[in-house]
Image (cartoon, coloured by chain):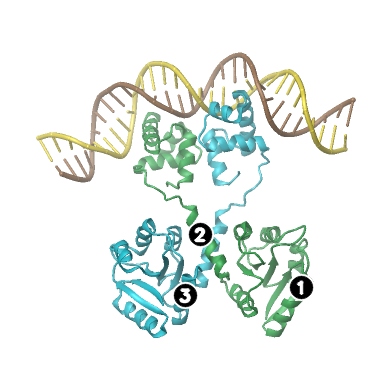
Chain colours: A green, B cyan, C brown, D yellow
Amino acid sequence: MIKVLLYDDSNQFREAIALLLDGSGDFEIVGSFNNCETATTDISMLHPDVILMDIDMPNTTGIEGVRMIRQKNDSIKIIMLTVFDNNKNIYDAIRFGANGYVLKKSAPAAIINAIKDVFEGGAPMNSSIATQVLQMFAGMSPATQNYGLSEKEKEVLQSLVDGNSYKMVAASLKISIDTVRTHIRNIYEKLQVNSKSAAVAKALKDRIL
Amino acid sequence: MIKVLLYDDSNQFREAIALLLDGSGDFEIVGSFNNCETATTDISMLHPDVILMDIDMPNTTGIEGVRMIRQKNDSIKIIMLTVFDNNKNIYDAIRFGANGYVLKKSAPAAIINAIKDVFEGGAPMNSSIATQVLQMFAGMSPATQNYGLSEKEKEVLQSLVDGNSYKMVAASLKISIDTVRTHIRNIYEKLQVNSKSAAVAKALKDRIL
DNA sequence: ATGCCCATCGCATAAATATGCGTTTGAAGT
DNA sequence: ACTTCAAACGCATATTTATGCGATGGGCAT
């Protein structure tokens, strides 16, 4: 029996889910609430295996709910429920550590499978959501072009990114400060910048490391 | 009929897939090669709808194959095939724009569904892979703590991240350079740094914007 | 109304950075 | 043998940053 805790502001939906899960026989609903303000205490009282969390709830949203829960507990599986699949919420929910993301309009069997899947360590997602997740990833990498930095130059640049001054770079790489200058000169030319902070920004944005 | 192009260095595997797809009746295999060096020309000759691409191929890997294809064509769907699911390859493949990621050990029906899914705009992934993708996302956000920057301070910091000098910040925000200094002083204190580049690095790493 | 914080500005100065013009050495390639 | 190039170093100097110690005015809250 998988112990399920449910948060959704619609009584109707909660009842429908309860009916569905009870009918299956593999689940035990240990709690069902219309808001997730008390999520952390609920969890310590009820010890659920899986939490179904609606995204759109008044006052405390499902996103905040996830954040609250994850500050205390990293192991409980959380599936987000939503009616919309075209939302920045997807990004936030995942960022805060949700384990799955299911549309409410999914077939009952799909919801049941999602709970079982997440319980076993999977990450159930509707097709449209999985697509968006991949696109977020793809959009993240700005065609990392190669600036042709030498090994040493990369080391120096990394040191700058770590917040070091010329002096500190020289010390940590055991070279003279004038050599550091030379390297940085060359880095600037290759990256087409003319200040330390611009170089650092470019290094981080374009992931040259 | 979904037109499928297949790259895999194992003849045995290619034959097995051919058999599987032919048997289904919904697919037409328009090409089948043991390397993806000529991928771009293959595509313009054969006009596939979906490409199945093995990750581990000699010489030109599947990752490079994806990169090559995506430079020319953004609409063809690409599914990566692999025996391992615990690999940095997942990240790279997705980054370069793969649409799905399927383990070779998956059930035949799962592979068929994956092709149909990706053809319809989905993003088929094995459960273990979906989990890893979500974890990459979750790991990306380092608990963005709030440094209590004021609105103006954020504007100034953003301008620094854009590579501007004090002078340029002053000009773009239409305030005096001394005011810029004051803001930056306060930013440094709040972020606990003492140089422009360190502030920029922290802003980007901790996503304070 | 009294304080507190934000945003604005000023001046001064030590430290760091950016950049120009050089040199030497050694490894890799032709 | 010759060229090319990364890597190391030096010196000089204009500019930029970092930071100390100020100030004024406007909201907002108690």
Per the model, the C-alpha gap separating discs 2 and 3 is 19 Å
Name which quarter of the figure residue A159 lies in: top left
Q: Residue at x 32, y 69 (%)?
A: B46
Name which quarter of the figure residue B134 lies in: bottom right
Label 1: few (<14), some or many (≥20) within 10 Å?
some
Amino acid marked by disc 2:
Gln
Element under disc 2: helix
Pair 2/1: label in front? 2
Residue under numbered circle 2: A135
Residue under numbered circle 1: A31
Element under disc 1: strand
Foreground pick, B179 / A200? B179
Amino acid marked by disc 1:
Gly
Q: Between disc 2 and disc 1, whose residue precedes? A: 1
Q: Residue at x 75, y 71 (%)?
A: A46
What percent of the width, then of the height, locates residue B1? 41, 77
Q: How many marks?
A: 3
Q: Is residue B122 shown above or below C19?
A: below
Whether tag 3 and tag 1 are in contact, CB under 8 A, the answer is no
Both labels 2 and 1 in a single chain? yes
Per the model, the C-alpha gap separating discs 3 and 1 is 38 Å
Residue under numbered circle 3: B116
Pair 2/3: label in front? 3
